Amino acid sequence: MTRSVVQRDTLRGAKLIGAVAVVVALVTLPAYGDQYTLTTFIRTIYFGFLALSVGFLLGQGGMISLTQTAFFGISGYVVGLLGAERGVPFPIPELAGLALVAVTAFLFGLIVMRTHGIVLLMLTLALGQICWSFARQNTSVLHGWAGIRGIQPPSVLGLDLTQNATFYWMSLVIFGLGLLLLWRLVESPFGLALNGIRESPRRMSALGYPVFWLRVTAFVIAALYAGVGGILAAWSSGIVTPTALQLSRTIWILLIVILGGARYFWGPVLGAVIAVWLDVIISQLTPRYNTVIGIVFVVVILVAPNGILGVWERISAKRRRFREVAENEHAEALSTAPKARRRLSRAEED
Amino acid sequence: MTLPDQQYAIVTRQVSKTFGGIKAVQGVDIAVAVGERRALIGPNGAGKSTLFNLITGEISIDEGQIHVLGRDATRFSVQRRARLGLGRTYQISQLFLELSVEQSLFLASAAGIGLGLSLLNGWRDRTEDRAWTREVAGQVGLADHLFRRVGELSHGLQRQLELGMAFAMRPRLVMLDEPAAGLSPAERQTLVALIQAMAPDITLILIEHDMDIVMQLAQRITVLHRGVVVTEGTPGEIQKNSMVQRIYLGEAHV
């Protein structure tokens, strides 16, 4: 007993030390990382938001949505149209972008959230494609393929966000807040209800839950995460084009979420980190990034249908079971025959 | 409209449902008093499950009226009927396989109270609700399995959880759809004891093929055959009824 408590505390301590080390490494990154590394981390963060959006719906609510990149694009376009082109001061374009994302998600949610599984997949695909086609073909306002250029991050509280390091820190803080909020959401009764809907919407209805409205709410929340990612992306890259909304990106995000482990809170984040950095590493070796990530994906799904964190859980569960068995034997031995006690003491000497 | 609805948990009037030309339920009138233990029996295809799902709202009604716990619920959604105090179990389990027993019971109990919007308090922090889930778990013999994943439970324990989720809702009316399906004789006795221990003011409607269980649990029995109520009576009356015997032997042509 006492031994296992000690072990558990050691494990918790190790995890805490690991977490602190990661946070310190991330915060101090501008001190030792070059500009390219910083930019890559910024990209990880805004794609991380998009991954959280997809992962929240898929992992917590069991909903596969192919519309999330549209929300990523919508907020970016609004920031570009109002901020860069019409000079509307911060934070109006950003808030307007998020508001439009919320309204669009609500309307889309009304259309699709009564459906499940493959029907939901096809409907969200269609809605995403409508948004993409609109962005692509509207030349009068959105400038078609050319998109909107010259977007700049604002100056807030005297911070010069055009500085890469400052922008990185700001992104990191926003991402931290986003994670904190999402974690509370997942742990809340609302989050648990989403899990229930994932497992059995029929049962949730029979228990008296307004399943449809809970799903619509989740859809709007997820869209806002994609929207925040879209704003950071527009600020960081300075441009927004139909590429932000296109299907290949939608699928890429879905894949990285599954790669990391959609069921797990950190799954989408891990997926985003791996996918973005794999991009960097592979691009130095070969132009065939998509081929490589495709192969990685196939292998991971074959070996671990629950993603990388699924493998981790399987290993630690096995270890836990070992420990429990050992503990039980230990306890049994202490409480029963002296012969067993002797056997145990021998075992401990070994 | 003169029936004193308050005394009845369920009143159906001329309820009918047709599936593609087949009259699954035809002009069914039943009235189940508050606190009554009622069984619906009949051979396969008699319309028991259809009637059951018409009452819970999972199937939409073609004709007739359904009053649930004193309210005309004919047009109410499944959710709304549940919130009136109607709890049900499923014949083929609709359990949250990836969640724990505790989470399942919590969700069942929280449906009535409301989820609450606080992000500061996770569901784990709702100690009162969790105390209630522990109490229900004890009631249905799952106290030692609170933190296990539902998918890992044996079939017998899953049936007990079905029952527990219905109880956790603090229902006024519980509808059990073949609660003992697939259970061993010993598990059946456990389940019967759990249902018998239910508070006497909770109304029970039960579909069950096992006549021993029906006789142990029901105060009154409604016999359905080809979508029509054939007869209704106490277990003793039904056992003696020659028409019921013929239906079960497959000779009746009503």
Image (cartoon, grey):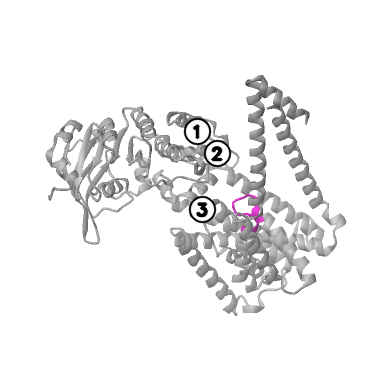
**Residue type, label 3:** Thr
Q: Identify the amino acid type marked 1.
A: Asp
Whether marks 3 and 1 lie on the same chain:
no
Identify the residue at image location x=27%, y=48%: B74
Counting other residues with Cα less than 10 Å from the Cα at mark 3, is it few (<14), some (14-19), or many (20 or more)? some
Residue B115 visible in this rendered orientation of the protein? yes
Picture quarter containing residue A75? bottom right
Chain letter of disc 1? B
Image: magenta residue range: A258-268
Kindly check if marks 1 and 2 are in contact, taking CB atoms under 8 A apart as contact: yes
Q: What element carries label 1?
A: helix
The residues bearing labels 3 and 2 have C-alpha atoms spaced at a distance of: 18 Å
The residue that disc 2 covers is: B123
- Badge 3 is on which residue? A217
Image location (x, y in percent) of residue A145:
64, 78
The residues bearing labels 3 and 1 have C-alpha atoms spaced at a distance of 24 Å
- The answer to whether residue A152 is seen in the rendering is no
Q: Is residue A263 magenta?
A: yes
Residue nearer the viewer, B38 or A182: B38
- Badge 1 crowding class, 10 Å Cα cut-off, few under 14, some 14 to 19, many 20 or more, is some
Q: Which residue lies under the disc numbered 1? A: B129
Say whether residue B103 is left or right of residue A313.
left
Q: Could you tell me how far apart the alpha carbons at marks 1 and 2 are, in whole angstroms?
A: 9 Å
